[in-house]
Amino acid sequence: MRLSPNLTLWGRANSANVQKTLWALEELGLPYTHKLVGGSHGGLDEPSYRAMNPNGLVPTLQDGELTVWESHATLRYLAASYGENTLWPVDPRERAMVDQWTDWTATTFQPAWIAVFWLLVRTPPEQRDDKAIAAALAKTVAALRILDANLAERDYVAGDRLSYADIASGVALYRWFTMDIDRPAMPGVENWYRRLQERPAFRKAVMVSYDELVARLAF
Ligand SMILES: N[C@@H](CCC(=O)N[C@@H](CS)C(=O)NCC(=O)O)C(=O)O
């Protein structure tokens, strides 16, 4: 039995991790309330927020009595509850591929690209460390080459349709393609980015200005 959704997303719209949950909510066409907290909105140290999320980070997702944090856990929850055979493949073999790329994003791809974003965009120019930027860029390019080879074989990260693996990894793309960096050609990734930009949910959740974060290390 499925309960009807009673969803609230907590988190600022210019957070990449919040964007994953937001993209999934939009992709699934679910009704939800969006509460802007974190960053310049504050609120993460409030006892009521810490009671929901002891890390004091965003996103946090509520669905009725359920509270869940960790962006990839929110994706799996939404996909499993409301995305059967769309974002959530029921076949365990198909889902293994989705989980493989989602966990790879958490452990390998996102730490690399987030480092580039922090070292280059969030760090004020006078404090930038060119060597650290070059090292983070090399790691990101190495990870993207793995994605690129995968996407030479298929339209989406784990097969021929969008899954939560595309959401976990694809939030990086708007920043990757708009940062002031040299990008080696990667046709698989570029075509994937083109396909994602055709989706209203991607444009609404991910193609969001990050001007507020430029030269800002505070949060
Ligand atoms: N592993 C967590 C990381 C959450 C995280 O680091 N969130 C950042 C934003 S992307 C945050 O809350 N920063 C403090 C703030 O926004 O004020 C997840 O995937 O949800």
Image (cartoon, rainbow, N blue to C red):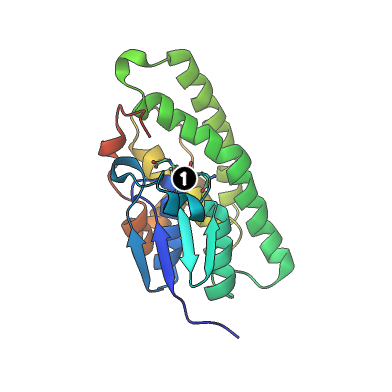
The image quarter in which residue 42 lies: top left
The image quarter in which residue 28 lies: bottom left
Does residue 174 lie above or below 52 as drawn?
Answer: above
Q: Of all residues shown, which one is farthest toward the bottom? A: 1
Quarter of the image for the C terminus: give it: top left
* Residue 156 visible in the displayed image: no
Residue in the picture at 44% in, 74% down: 6
Does residue 78 lie above or below 135 as drawn?
Answer: below
The amino acid at mark 1 is Leu
Q: Position of residue 144 (x, y in %)?
A: 54, 39
Q: Position of residue 160 (x, y in %)?
A: 57, 64
Quarter of the image for the N terminus: give it: bottom right
Residue in the picture at 52% in, 71% down: 65
Q: Position of residue 164 (x, y in %)?
A: 54, 60
Does residue 57 lie above or below 130 as drawn?
Answer: below
Residue in the picture at 34% in, 58% down: 35
Relative depth, front residue between 146 and 20: 20
Could you say whether the residue bearing mark 1 is in a helix, strand or loop?
loop
Relative depth, front residue between 8 and 178: 8
Q: Is mark 1 within 8 Å of ligand 1?
A: yes
Disc 1 target residue: 57
Does residue 197 lie above or below 119 as drawn?
Answer: below
The image quarter in which residue 201 lies: bottom left
